Image: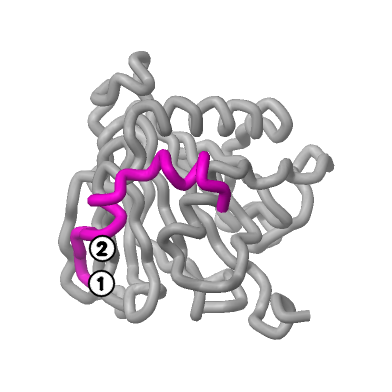
Amino acid sequence: MTGAVSDTLDAAALAAPAELKGVRIHQALLPPAAQAALLEDIRAVVRAAPLVRPVTPGGRAMSVRMTAAGDFGWITDSAGYRYERRHPSGVPWPPIPARVRAIWDAVAETDRAPECCLINWYADGARMGLHQDRDEGDFGCPVVSVSLGDDALFRVGGTERRAPTRSIWLRSGDVAVMGGAARLAWHGVDRTRFASSPLLPDGGRINLTLRVVTPPDAGAA
């Protein structure tokens, strides 16, 4: 992580995260200028690997649109949920931008590098139902979530589907870390506050989730 990139993170937010059911939340970790620079990086990724609307194996179109950067992207279609090395159009996924990698290096507390940066676009009315991130091969590494744009009501439960949940509003520049006992917690986004952020004055939310995809022995090879 270069000093020029890491210096854009708020030191107080990095040192003193909030916590919600084991999820560490670094509120306002990214100052406005860092958010704007990161937004341009994500726009470059989307130009190379355009957003698609995923369809679940059961045939239901999801309300978010997705793309990815890194060695892998997460795919859902009639064949199931999985990671693939290429965008549905056939092109390789673009590299994870250095600014995104710097966030992982600052908060993930692991020597392994992220292999996927999943990019979700929430238009007005989009949401994400409660789910677990179980398609990865190394649950010892966290999922790191970066919020840009509209506020989002983030709900977190336990490792059992019926466990009680709690919620918090995530705002642009917040970074959540789901690791340890919270790595397999059920979680989702109930709704967003459309056009609530000056970063995207026309409204919308971008969520980046960084993951290690391959098993530990693959990462060490």
What range is drawn magenta here?
Answer: 1-21
Rendering coords of residue 120 (x, y %) = 49, 41
Q: Which mark is residue 98?
A: none
Query: Disc 2 or 1, which lies upstream in sequence?
Result: 1
Q: Quadrant of residue 193?
A: top left
Q: Quadrant of residue 90?
A: top right
Rendering coords of residue 133 (x, y %) = 47, 67
User: Which residue shows up at 58% across the image and 31% down it?
Assistant: 41
Of the residues shown, which amino acid type is indicated by label 1?
Answer: Gly
As drawn, is 41 to the left or to the right of 109?
A: right
As drawn, is 3 to the left or to the right of 158?
A: right
Callout 2 environment at 10 Å: few (<14), some (14 to 19), or many (20+)? many
Of the residues shown, which amino acid type is indicated by label 2?
Answer: Val
Callout 1 environment at 10 Å: few (<14), some (14 to 19), or many (20+)? some
Q: Which mark is residue 22?
A: 1
2 vs 1, front mark: 1
Q: Quadrant of residue 129?
A: bottom left
Do callouts 2 and 1 mark residues in contact (Cβ within 8 Å)? yes
Residue 117 lies within the magenta run: no
- Residue 134 lies, with reference to residue 127, above or below; the image says below
At mark 2, the secondary structure is strand
- Residue 82 lies, with reference to residue 7, above or below; the image says below
Whether residue 95 is visible, yes or no, is yes
Whether residue 80 is visible, yes or no, is no
User: Which residue shows up at 34% across the image and 28% down it?
Assistant: 32
As drawn, is 130 to the left or to the right of 193?
A: right
Label 2 vs label 1: CA separation? Answer: 9 Å
At mark 1, the secondary structure is loop
- The quadrant of the rendering that contains the C terminus is bottom right
User: Which residue shows up at 47% across the image and 35% down it?
Assistant: 121
Which residue has dot 2 on it? 156
Residue 16 lies within the magenta run: yes
